[in-house]
Amino acid sequence: MNLEKVIFGFFVLLAATLNFGFFIGPLTDPAQHNVFELFAAIVVSLITTVLKFGDRTQLGAVHLATSLVADLQLIAAFVVWIWATQVVAEGLTPGHLASVVSLSGGALLANLVSVVLLLTETITFHRS
């Protein structure tokens, strides 16, 4: 068993599941979307991105691209959350929360592509 592949797979799946946990629920219900879960999704997504930097293959480049998209979407969602709670006078409105959840949905899609790539790579792996 290759420990490096285990760690890589662990973080790819953890990034997807944390993102899914934040995303799921009514679009405008703040009780269903915890900011700490969003923060955890960002941190794990950034760790996953760092782990993907070493692969120089075409598949590795696509893995990295999916991670960068997820990072960008999650960071944008966090910025909207901070903007709504710390800058805007009316606070976190249903419209702001809908934007945050929608952005995390885009990151979730990128994470799902990454999981599919990981599964495809695992299935097509040939032992020598």
Image (cartoon, rainbow, N blue to C red):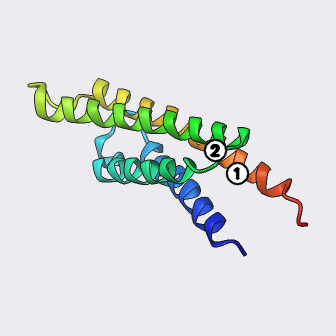
Return the residue at label 1: 118
Secondary structure beneath disc 1?
Answer: helix
Query: Along the horizontal axis of the image, is 121 left or right of 100?
Result: right
Q: Residue furthest bottom?
A: 1
Query: Along the horizontal axis of the image, is 2 left or right of 121?
Result: left
Mark 2 Cα shell of 10 Å, populated few (<14), some (14-19), many (≥20): many
Examine the rendering and report whether any part of residue 107 can be seen. no
Say what amino acid the circle numbered 1 marks. Leu
**Residue 93, percent from left and from top:** 23, 28
What residue is rendered at 50% in x and 47% in y?
Answer: 49
Q: Looking at the rendering, in which quadrant would you find the C terminus? A: bottom right
Query: Along the horizontal axis of the image, is 12 left or right of 123?
Result: left
**Residue 16, percent from left and from top:** 54, 50
Find residue 114 and name its label: 2
Q: Looking at the rendering, in which quadrant would you find the N terminus? A: bottom right
Secondary structure beneath disc 2?
Answer: helix
What residue is rendered at 31% in x and 32% in y?
Answer: 97
Along the line of sight, the residue nearer the viewer: 116 or 56: 56
What residue is rendered at 15% in x and 31% in y?
Answer: 91
Q: Are the residues flagged by discs 1 and 2 in contact, CB closer than 8 Å?
A: yes
What residue is rendered at 53% in x and 41% in y?
Answer: 67
Up-down relation of residue 122 to residue 52 (above or below): below
Say what amino acid the circle numbered 2 marks. Ser
**Residue 48, percent from left and from top:** 50, 52
Quarter of the figure with residue 102: top left
Find residue 15 and name its label: none
Up-down relation of residue 24 to residue 127 (above or below): above
